[in-house]
Amino acid sequence: MAYSFPEEVLEHVFSFLSSDRDRNAVSLVCKSWYEIERWCRRRVFIGNCYAVSPDIVIRRFPEVRALEMKGKPHFADFNLVPEGWGAYVHPWIRAMSAAYPLLEEIKLKRMVVTDESLELIARSFKNFKVLVLSSCEGFTTDGLASIAANCRNLRELDLRESEVEDLSGHWLSHFPDNCTSLVSLNMSCLGSEVSFSALERLVARCPNLRTLRLNRAVPIEKLPNLLHRAPQLVELGTGAYSAEIRSDIFSNLAEAFSVCKQLKGLSGFWDVVPAFLPAMYSVCSGITSLNLSYATIQSPDLVKLVSQCRNLQRLWVLDYIEDTGLEALAASCKDLQELRVFPSDPFGAEPNVALTEQGLVSVSEGCPKLQSVLYFCRQMSNAALVTIARNRPEMIRFRLCIIEPQAPDYLTLEPLDAGFGAIVENCKELRRLSMSGLLTDKVFEYIGNHAKKLEMLSIAFAGDSDLGLHHVLSGCESLRKLEIRDCPFGDKALLANAAKLETMRSLWMSSCSVSFGACKLLGQKMPRLNVEVIDERGPPDSRPESCPVEKLYVYRTVAGRRADMPGFVWTMDGDKSLTFS
Amino acid sequence: MELQLELALSSSSGRGSDPNQDCNRRRKRCFDTAFLGVMESVDSPQTLPLLIWDEKQRSNGELHEQKRIHDLAASDRNVEDDVLVGWPPVKSWRKQFGHHSRRVCATNYVNVEHGGGDGGGRGLNSMYVKVKMEGVGIGRKVDLSSHRSYQTLIAKLIAMFGKCEDNVETYKLTYQDKDGDWVLAGDVPWETFVHSAQRLKLQKNGY
């Protein structure tokens, strides 16, 4: 080379690049940039833990400080992935304990984490700071005790939505008296009561605590004690928000909230007694994020609270809010960006609340910044969807669940193709879409033609034939994740678009019409894909090749087939004959 | 001497492959394709599809046939006790906190005691509990509400773990009750068992 730009300078320049895409681009420029970049990459994100192996990651990036990784497919949230499927983090922890002694952060989603793993983390990483376990399972409060006791510089312990075997609340008392570094603690998913005095002392000695999400067992009467010790809190998750109605409890609570001038986010609110909600009014004007999805209170009380929160950007709420409540929301909260409405009675045959498509239409009309929607309801019309699409062309995430599968437009009894077609046609920035209701192959034609930025698509009980799937796979250029259940999609579209699957993170198909023979062919011909057949009826080769498989999970990988499959998962590949345990 | 810079795409992985060697094999890319929107389709492989899609071959009759066959089979799929698995798509712990009126209260208590994430997976009365089989590292989950007797439950568990169903009698089922004690299953009436079992363990009878 005629010149040599000092490595240190390049490294310094690269240190300003935080996005993985930028870093990946940089590493492709030339050999020396590749080398410099890989030695200074500190954060690694792995969207599918089976797409790569610990050894490969460690070999390429020797100095990682933060790992973020996801395991099970999204449909595992709805019990579609049988227990024992995989996503064990332990091999990663084992490998990293040797290779990354300076590791500071581990963030996992939908993975199986054991106490053994937690203990290994606590022992191996002297400077460990951040542990976020989102929708994980497999560990107990004993594992948490190890983390609390040994991680001297722990900043974040966030167990959001994880399934923890709750042996006792004693784990919290394992934080040593000299632990003052906590910034974020989320224990909302735990059942057991922790020692309140230990919690109080912990909160008092951590001056940087910004996020505190309590569990249901922390009673409302004790909340002021914590708030007074942490007036700098930015995010608070209450415990059970109920007590007998006494004026001293109320006034203590109101006073405590009034000193928390920085509060921006509120959650918790189990067992809400409406009489205690006004205690929070003093902070409402600063609130940007409100999670009331556990609050089983009626619309008038919800409206009173929400209309105080003029700067609200994100609202999660139960359908008790009803159409009238959403209309009030649309009138008061002009900064609203994200709305999630959850069903209070998902399995009831009849509607229990007056929430219809109209509520969503109102919000789409009144909230000019609305870009992210998750909405459960019992009726929908093409007209409403067209209106929503025209009102909010900058929509980014649109997830609609009409509770009755294959429900048509309730006004015209037609499929909802035109409505969802309008969504993808108008909302050119749409990145995520979940559909429901009666849908034919036509809607997939619209999606294939228009949804060019769509990255994730969820389909259920929709379509007529392979043509539907073909439109999606051949048309959606940005598609990364596709999850399908109970659709009449078979072999043809899958095999005709096999190459597309290598450009995506993963494909999930359950209760469709993909034959075992097609799965075998796909696995044999596409060595860079893992084609996993999940079938609890027994080995697929004990049935005819034309027999459809129960579940199919296809993902691209550079690590080859995995070695930890349970007895009901088979990988199709051409190297060996079908193997099963 | 002119410095020649080439932009080249590495082959699809981090297997320590050297992207610059690949440079020599590929043509030089122009600025537009290199920088504008290429990264998303970096790995657009040049493989042929495994099947050629024929636009004309899908006649209406074929479409309806495909859907009809699928719908017929659908009744066997994914349905336990007339309830669809995983539908509506609500995370199991969300179901506990909603409106209770149509639900059996006991069911809710069972769900809550399972640690908040367990159970309540499907339907009005579903009651998922964890099951471990002696000698098998990985546990499973079973829906107690989809069974009516100890016999069907044990048979299902044996099948779940891939063992031979013939000798049901050689297996012993124990469960952990609400007090945390491990008790031999079969002594109490089925309904009582269903409402008190927190987790199950299946063992082969000792010799």
Image (spheres, coloured by chain):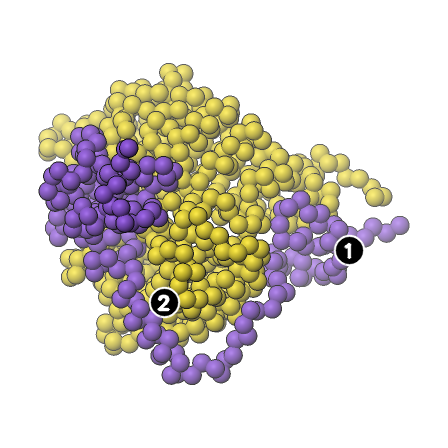
Chain colours: A yellow, B purple
Residue B34 lies, in percent from the top left, at 67, 58
Q: Is A262 situated above or below A389?
A: above
Any mark on residue B24, and which? 1
- How far separated are the C-alphas under marks 1 and 2? 46 Å
From the top left corner, tell me how far across and down residue B49 is, in percent: 57, 69
Q: Is residue A440 above or below residue A73?
A: below
Closer to viewer: mark 1 or mark 2: 2
Q: Residue at x 39, y 51 (%)?
A: A568
Amino acid, disc 2:
Cys
Tell me which chain the residue with mark 1 is part of: B
Residues at badges 1 and 2 in contact (C-beta under 8 Å)? no
User: Can residue A156 be seen by looking at this rendering?
Assistant: no
Q: Are marks 1 and 2 on the same chain?
A: no
Residue found farthest to the top: A177
| Residue found at the far front of this picture | B207
Query: Which residue bears the numbered disc 2?
Result: A487
Q: How many marks?
A: 2
Which residue is located at x 29 percent, y 59 percent? Answer: B78
Measured as percent of width and height from the top left, residue B140 is found at 32, 44
* Element type at mark 1: helix
**Residue at x 16% of width, y 35% of height:** A242
Please tell me whether residue A541 is drawn above or below residue B56 in the rendered image: above
**Location of residue B6 in the rendering, given as x and y in whole percent from the top left corner:** 75, 54
Position of A59 with respect to A379 (left or right) is right
* Other residues around mark 2 within 10 Å, as few (<14) / some (14–19) / many (≥20): many
Q: Is residue A197 above or below residue A433?
A: above
Give the quarter of the image for residue B85: bottom left
Q: Quadrant of residue A95?
A: top right
Give the residue displayed 34% in from the left and 71% down from the top: B70
Chain designation of label 2: A
Q: Amino acid at mark 1?
A: Asn
Q: Secondary structure at mark 2?
A: loop
